Image (spheres, helix red, strand yellow):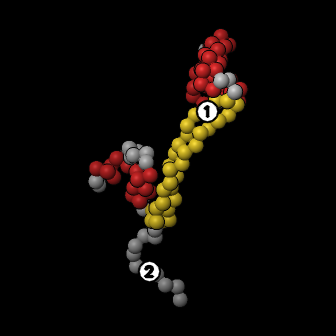
Amino acid sequence: MTAYERRIRDGRFPRTREGLGALMSAAGLGDVRTEALARDHQVGAEDWWAGPASGVGAIEQLVNSRGPEGVATAKREYDVLRRIRQGGRRVGSAACGVAGSGERVAAAGPRSHVW
């Protein structure tokens, strides 16, 4: 096993088109194709806050673990950042990722025939 194959096995591979392609090829896929995807994720400021307020995800659970006072403090700070960043209307963040596709390659070996 090469050093690169060990890194892939351990989940340590470059989060790039090339890294994902190498991971998929190492997994035995053929005709591997990858693509970088990017967009600016924009939502209404109150919709963005709805996640933390309802306890969705790890950071949201942390916010809610501080009780009503902690939630109120977090909301005040969120509102300050919202006003600074977006003028209070919409909140956004850059989102990017890598997608890939490939075909399963049949294992090499003797072919069997059905008569």
Q: Position of residue 54 (x, y in %)?
A: 69, 26
| Residue for badge 2 | 111
Query: Type of residue at label 2?
Result: Arg
Q: Which mark is residue 64?
A: none
Q: In the figure, residue 40 lies in which quadrant?
A: top right
C-beta proximity under 8 Å, tags 2 and 1: no
Pointer 2 local density, CA inside 10 Å: few below 14, some 14–19, many at least 20: few
Residue at the spot 55% in from the left edge and 37% down from the top edge: 94
Q: Nearer the viewer, mark 2 or mark 1?
A: 1
Q: Position of residue 19 (x, y in %)?
A: 40, 51
Name the quadrant of the N terminus: bottom left
Whether residue 113 is visible to the viewer of this picture, yes or no, is yes
In the picture provided, is 109 more to the left or to the right than 97?
A: left
Q: In the figure, residue 89 lies in which quadrant?
A: top right
Residue at the spot 64% in from the left edge and 20% down from the top edge: 83
- The residues tagged by marks 2 and 1 sit, at their Cα atoms, a distance apart of 55 Å
Q: Is residue 7 above or below residue 76?
A: below
Q: Residue furthest bottom?
A: 115
Residue at the spot 53% in from the left edge and 43% down from the top edge: 96
Q: Quick one: 73 or 39, which is closer to the camera?
A: 39
Q: Secondary structure at mark 2?
A: loop
Pointer 1 local density, CA inside 10 Å: few below 14, some 14–19, many at least 20: some
Q: Residue furthest top?
A: 69
Say whether disc 2 or disc 1 marks the residue closer to the N-terminus. 1
Q: Is residue 100 above or below residue 68?
A: below
Query: Type of residue at label 1?
Result: Gly
Q: Position of residue 112 (x, y in %)?
A: 46, 81
Q: Secondary structure at mark 1?
A: strand
| Residue for badge 1 | 92
